[in-house]
C-alpha cells in the first residue's frame, strides 16, 4: 500500500521537484498550490503525511496546521524560506514533526518523509503497545521493564518513576545510542503533546537521571547530545 503525501507549496518549480522526488521514491503524491486546496484535499481524501510550506498565498502554514490538527494527528513537515521561523515551527505551538529550510534537496526531504513515517506510530502515544508485552531491546541492558506494573528495575533496584519518566525511559531503552530530539520525545511520550513544553523533557530527564544516580552514582545512563536531544548509553 503506497503512502499518500499531500504537498502544499505555491512555488511551482519547488512543488514539481518535490512531487517528482517523492513519486520516484514510491509515494503517492498530490500537489496543492494553496492552503485552501490542501485542506480540502486532506479532508476529502486524507493523507499519511503532509508537507506544508509556511508562506502560502491564501494562508500560512501556522494557521493551517493547527486547523488540520484539530481533527487529525497526521504528521506534518514544514517548509520554510526563513531560518528564523524554525523556533516557532518546532515549538509546540505547531507540533511539527520536522521541517526543512529552503533551499533544500528534494532527496533530503524524501529521506525526512520516510523517517517521520517510520517513527509515526500512533499506538506509541496511547500505550496500546505496552499491552502487547515486553521490549526485547532491553536485553543486554541493566534495565528490566515491567509494562504491566509500570515498573523499571535498574541494576536490580526498582526505580520509583512518574508515568512520564517511565514512558521516556521506555522509549530510550528501545534503541540505545539512538538520539531522540526533545520534540520527538514529546511526540512519543505525551499523549497530548500540546500540554507540554520541550523544557519539560529536560526536567523529566533530569529527574530520571537523579533516580538512576542513586542506584549507580558513576553511570551516566542517559547521554545529552548538545543541540539534538537525548540517548540511552549504548555500551554497558
Ligand atoms: Ca511559499
Image (cartoon, rainbow, N blue to C red):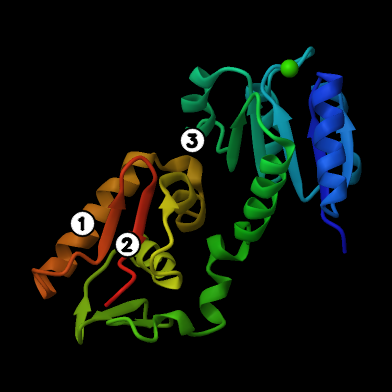
Secondary structure type for disc 1: helix
Q: Quadrant of ligand 1?
A: top right
**Residue 178 percent coordinates (x, y):** 43, 62
* Image x and y of residue 223, in percent: 28, 58
User: Is ligand 1 less than 8 Å from the beta carbon at label 3?
Assistant: no
Most foreground residue, 149 or 152: 152
Quadrant in which residue 125 is drawn: bottom right
Q: Quickly name the residue at label 1.
A: 207
Q: Is residue 96 visible?
A: yes
- Residue 72 % position (x, y): 71, 45
Q: What separation in Å lies between label 3 and label 1 (alpha carbons)? A: 22 Å
Q: Quadrant of the N terminus?
A: bottom right
Mark 2 or mark 3, which has the lower sequence index?
A: 3
Residue that badge 3 annotates = 92
Element at label 2: helix
Image point 32% across, 62% down: which residue? 165
List the residue tagged with mark 2: 165
Amino acid at each position: 500500500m503506497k503512502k499518500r503525501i499531500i504537498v502544499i507549496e505555491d512555488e511551482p518549480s519547488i512543488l514539481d521537484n518535490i512531487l517528482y522526488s517523492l513519486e520516484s521514491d514510491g509515494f503517492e503524491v498530490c500537489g496543492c498550490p494553496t492552503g485552501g486546496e490542501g485542506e480540502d484535499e486532506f479532508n476529502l481524501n486524507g493523507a499519511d503525511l503532509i508537507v506544508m510550506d509556511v508562506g502560502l498565498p491564501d494562508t500560512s502554514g501556522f494557521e493551517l496546521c493547527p486547523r488540520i490538527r484539530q481533527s487529525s494527528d497526521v504528521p506534518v513537515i514544514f517548509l520554510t524560506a526563513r531560518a528564523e521561523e524554525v523556533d516557532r515551527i518546532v515549538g509546540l505551538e505547531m507540533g511539527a514533526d520536522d521541517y526543512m529550510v529552503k533551499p533544500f534537496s528534494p532527496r533530503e526531504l524524501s529521506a525526512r518523509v520516510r523517517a517521520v513515517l517510520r517513527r509515526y506510530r500512533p499506538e506509541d502515544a496511547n500505550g496500546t503497545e505496552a499491552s502487547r508485552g515486553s521490549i526485547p531491546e532491553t536485553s543486554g541492558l541493566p534495565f528490566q521493564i515491567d509494562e504491566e506494573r509500570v515498573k523499571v528495575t535498574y541494576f536490580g533496584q526498582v526505580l520509583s518513576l512518574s508515568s512520564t519518566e517511565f514512558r521516556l525511559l521506555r522509549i530510550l531503552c528501545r534503541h540505545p545510542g539512538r538520539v531522540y530530539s526533545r520534540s520527538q520525545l514529546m511526540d512519543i511520550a505525551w499523549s497530548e503533546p500540546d500540554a507540554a513544553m520541550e523544557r519539560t523533557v529536560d526536567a523529566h530527564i533530569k529527574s530520571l537521571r537523579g533516580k538512576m544516580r542513586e542506584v549507580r552514582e558513576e553511570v551516566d545512563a542517559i547521554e545529552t547530545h548538545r543541540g539534538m536531544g537525548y540517548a540511552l548509553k549504548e555500551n554497558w
